[in-house]
Amino acid sequence: MLFIIIFQYNTNMKININIKAELMLASVAIFWGVTFLMMQDAIETVPVYSFLFYRFFLAFVIMFIISYKKTKVLRPKDLFYGLVLGVILFFSYASQTFALLYTQSTVVAFLTGLMVVFVPFFSYILFRQHIPTKVIVASIIASIGLYYLTMNSSLEFGLGEALAIFCAVLFALHLLYTDIFSKKCEIFVVVTAQLFVVALLSMLFSLIFEQKTFDIPMSQTFFIALIVTSVFATAYAFLVQTYMQKFVTASKTVIIFVLEPLSAAFYGMFVGGEVFLFWQIIGAGLIILATIISQI
């Protein structure tokens, strides 16, 4: 794909590989943040799992076309890696969605963002990976910044909060296993298989829990959200994430991904007319500071 060609060209031009990879991962976080508002508008008329099915199925079709041309050998282990990542990713979305039924979206956003702490913790506990002190410091600062950016209510603990924390754990595991698999797999096959698994499970959950899966209102808002999220926030995003995590550790990747709620907040301010409060500005500054510290 084009991003790989550009990445390889800049690598040949002696540009630091890690810096280039980190910038590409930042673009993923920005796409996720910018499309958050589109997703909110789309699911007002289309059930959540139904939309996820269409989003991931279209992304799967895109990746299948690309992978078909680039893949010469289909290895069972690559399909297994895609299955593992797909299952983890789907249940991350599922737990996050159910959490929203029981608690406020700001609480879910904050608790989900705690994956910035879980990733280095699990990296050490589960995989005995050395975590630099600067990454630990940056993770703590990013968590504080995330709290000020997203929280506008008191934090209590109930079913919604438990599901949001479970979601954060799953997202952390997804990042960690992507980090491991990306170094020994055929990237295009793994990403394609992962998207197919999420699409399949989304369809099944939609058929079980929602009244409509296929007979949904086809509005302009839905189509715009579907195209943008499928192409940029799914096919592009997970291909870039998987490819670039060959060069960037999971602990640094998750700090970069905290830019997602920050970009969502900025996009909401410029497009949705939302207003930044003083503490949100402090939170945004802390997130940027954490990102800088992790790169020093």
Image: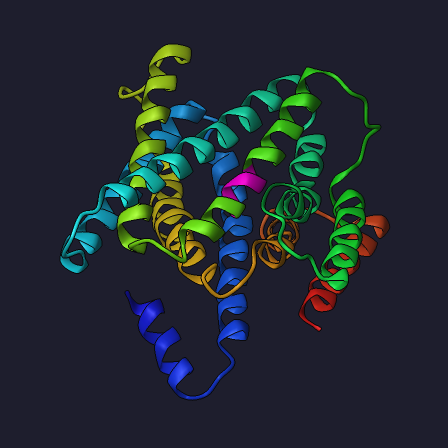
Residue 46 visible here: no
Expressed as whole percent of the image width and height from the top left, the position of residue 197 reads 32, 32
The residues colored magenta run 171-175
Expressed as whole percent of the image width and height from the top left, the position of residue 174 reads 50, 41
Which of the 4 image quadrants contains residue 259?
Answer: bottom right
Q: Is residue 267 above or below residue 111?
A: below
The residue under the point 59% across, 51% down is 260
Residue extending farthest to the bottom is 13
Residue 98 visible here: yes
The residue under the point 66% across, 29% down is 165
Expressed as whole percent of the image width and height from the top left, the position of residue 29 reads 54, 54
Expressed as whole percent of the image width and height from the top left, the position of residue 72 reads 14, 57
Taking the magenta stretch, the answer to whether it contains residue 141 is no
Q: Nearer the viewer, residue 19 or 105?
A: 19
The residue under the point 18% across, 56% down is 71
Q: Main secondary structure of the magenta part?
A: helix
Total number of numbered discs in the rendering: 0
The residue under the point 58% across, 41% down is 172
Q: Is residue 114 above or below residue 213?
A: below
Q: Is residue 68 above or below residue 288?
A: above
Q: Is residue 51 left or right of residue 67?
A: right
Q: Is residue 101 left or right of residue 21?
A: right
Q: Quadrant of the C terminus?
A: bottom right
Q: Quadrant of the N terminus?
A: bottom left
Q: Nearer the viewer, residue 68 or 286?
A: 68
Rendered image coloring scheme: rainbow
